[in-house]
Image (cartoon, helix red, strand yellow):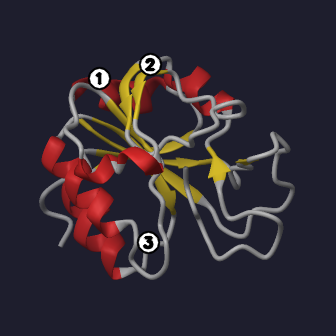
């Protein structure tokens, strides 16, 4: 359930496309940001938290996939804090590499970052693929399984993050 930007169309809720999951080749233990209606949501996870479950305030276990709801300026930050505290999974956010939150969380705590080739066309609530994304995205990982999945995915450029970048 990712609200990637203020919507200029029918919806601001967009789902990660299935080809991302096919390339990762993982089954996740938990999607803490799942839509209530999973008809067009392709996250291969054993367990799901929806907005009604308040996934941010539930316990997380195992390998996580996170496409967080952003909900306004820096709305993704609490989700990133919980994700990196948990320390095991793959997430996706806009490639806002100059944003303070990107430096404070993605560059600081991610072990690997995947920059997909081109812009990722997300799936709308009605199952229709978006035609003109307004931004690029990055996938990031922490933990051995997520790191290996990003490295083998062949979706674009993978960066191993080191402690000495700043």
* Element at label 1: helix
Examine the rendered structure and indicate whether residue 97 appears above or below residue 147: below
Q: Are marks 1 and 2 in contact (CB under 8 Å)?
A: yes
Q: Mark 1 sits on what residue?
A: 145
Using the numbered discs, state the Cα–Cα distance from disc 2 to disc 3 in whole angstroms: 26 Å
Is the residue 98 above or below the residue 89 in the image? below
Q: Is residue 112 rendered to the left or right of residue 62?
A: right
Do we see residue 155 in this rendering? Answer: yes
- Residue under label 3, please give it: 97
Foreground of the two, 120 or 155: 120
How far across and how far down the image is residue 128, in percent?
Answer: 85, 44
Residue 117: x %, y % from top left: 65, 48
Determine if residue 139 is in view: no
First reached walking from the N terminus: tag 2 or tag 3: 2
Q: Circle 2 sits on which residue?
A: 26
Q: Residues within 10 Å of mark 1 (few under 14, many from 20)?
A: some
Q: Residue at x 42, y 33 (%)?
A: 150
Tally of marks: 3
Q: Which numbered dot is residue 106? A: none
Nearest to the observer: residue 14 or residue 118: 14
Q: Quadrant location of the C terminus?
A: bottom left
Residue at x 58%, y 63% (from the top left corner): 3
Q: Quadrant of residue 86?
A: top left
Instruction: For the residues labelled 2 and 3, say whether their Cβ atoms are less than 8 Å apart.
Output: no
Q: CA distance from mark 3 to mark 1?
A: 24 Å
Residue at 75% over, 63% down: 11
Secondary structure category for the residue under label 2:
loop
Q: Quadrant of residue 102?
A: bottom left
């Amino acid at each position: 359930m990712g609200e990637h930007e203020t919507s200029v169309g029918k919806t601001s809720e967009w789902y990660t496309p299935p080809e991302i999951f096919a390339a990762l080749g993982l089954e996740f233990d938990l999607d803490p940001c799942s839509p209530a209606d999973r008809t067009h949501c392709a996250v291969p996870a054993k367990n799901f938290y929806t907005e009604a479950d308040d996934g941010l305030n539930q316990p997380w276990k195992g390998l996580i996939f996170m496409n967080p709801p952003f909900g306004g300026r820096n709305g993704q930050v609490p989700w990133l804090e919980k994700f990196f505290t948990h320390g095991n999974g793959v997430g996706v956010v806009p490639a806002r590499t100059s944003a303070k939150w990107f430096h404070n969380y993605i560059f600081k705590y991610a072990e690997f970052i995947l920059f997909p080739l081109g812009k990722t066309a997300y799936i709308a609530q009605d199952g229709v693929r978006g035609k003109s994304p307004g931004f690029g995205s990055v996938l990031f990982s922490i933990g051995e399984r997520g790191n290996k999945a990003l490295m083998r995915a062949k979706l674009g450029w993978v960066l191993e993050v080191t402690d000495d970048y700043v």
